[in-house]
Image (tube, rainbow, N blue to C red):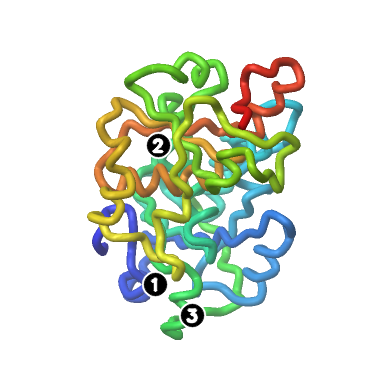
Amino acid sequence: MGQHQSIVSAEWLKDNLNNPDIKIIDCRFRLPDANWGYQQYNHSHIQNAYYLDLNDHLSQIVTTHGGRHPLPDISLLATKFEQLGIIKNKTTVVVYDDSRFAFSARLWWLLHYLGHDQVFILDGGWQHWQQLNYPTDNVIPPDGNGSFVPVPNLDLTVDIEQIKQCQTSPDTAIIDARSGDRHLGKTEPIDPIAGSIPHSHNVFWQENTTPEGFLKSSSELKKIWKPYLNYQQIIAYCGSGVTACVNIFALKSIGYHNCKLYVGGWSDWCSYLQKSTNLVTHY
């Protein structure tokens, strides 16, 4: 299945397009235009692919705290998986987007979180598939008949209280997946307050892939992550628990497994800052 055990090539997927034990899911999305991904999917997608939406399926309603993309209602998501024909621990799921894994990694992570490990990201994404002129259409596949009992692995997530406990722990690296300027508090395009979690490090999520949307080689990834691989655990966060999943995906691909997601991310952290000023790094 290619160089990393979490990824598949376009060639591999083309050869397996009609395998009934494989389900393909399109995760294309744009934060500024919530309808864009579904419109693109309806226009054209990988043959036999279904669509799951970041806001509608991979997150739930935003509240005061918890961040901009709280984890979805697990029973609703499991029902959706069944509708796509996913049989837990039997079906191979291949996910893709056109954003260097930004949204497909969230679904990849969610399936792992719910106990389904047979999920892979399409290397090169939608762009590479199109460049190769592999089969696309605008047909929405019929509902499947899956079976999915979700068993969330709560060890894969942390909340704000756990972050506070780990902040100065010598065993834990807290890694911010946002851009360097956002981590440094120089700019903040989305959330009301700029800054980052004190004592956090920064590995921008796009570092893990090439501009064309391919996962970098193991040796390149190990070089990027070398400063953190000796920590007992890594806690990944971003603005709202989406692009941090790309960092987790990259770490897993080079054999680092004790990685947890702070789903709320900076959007959750800064939602408490009106009450307290000691939670933010000032520059």
Which residue is depicted at the point 65% across and 63% down?
Answer: 37
* Residue 73 makes an appearance in the image: no
Nearest-to-viewer mark from 2 and 1: 2
Residue in the image at 59% along x and 62% along y: 28
Answer with mark 2 or mark 3, whichever residue precedes in sequence: 2
Q: Quadrant of residue 266?
A: top right
Q: Nearer the viewer, residue 281 or 107?
A: 281
Q: Is residue 34 above or below residue 181?
A: below
> Residue 260's image quarter?
top left
* Left or right for 271, reference 155: right
Q: Nearer the viewer, residue 68 or 9?
A: 68
Q: Are marks 2 and 3 in contact (CB under 8 Å)?
A: no
Q: Which residue is mark 2?
A: 115
Q: Could you tell me which secondary element the residue under label 1 belongs to?
A: loop
Going 60% across and 69% down the picture, which residue do you hit? 140
Tell me if mark 3 has few (under 14), some (14-19) or many (20+) residues whose alpha carbon lies within 10 angstroms of its own: some
Considering every residue shown, the one lying at the far bottom of the view is 133
Q: Is residue 129 visible?
A: yes
Q: How many marks?
A: 3
Q: For marks 3 and 1, give the CA distance.
A: 18 Å
User: At x 70% / y 21%, what residue is drawn?
Assistant: 272
Q: From the viewer's side, name the closer residue of 279 and 265.
A: 279
**Spatial CA span between label 2 and label 1:** 25 Å
Q: Is residue 74 above or below residue 54?
A: above
Q: Amino acid at mark 2?
A: Gly
Which residue is label 3 attached to?
130
Q: Nearer the viewer, residue 213 or 277?
A: 277
The amino acid beneath tag 1 is Asn
The answer to which of marks 3 and 1 sits earlier in the sequence is 1
Q: Residue beneath label 1, please?
A: 18
Q: Secondary structure at mark 3?
A: helix
**Amino acid, disc 3:** Gln
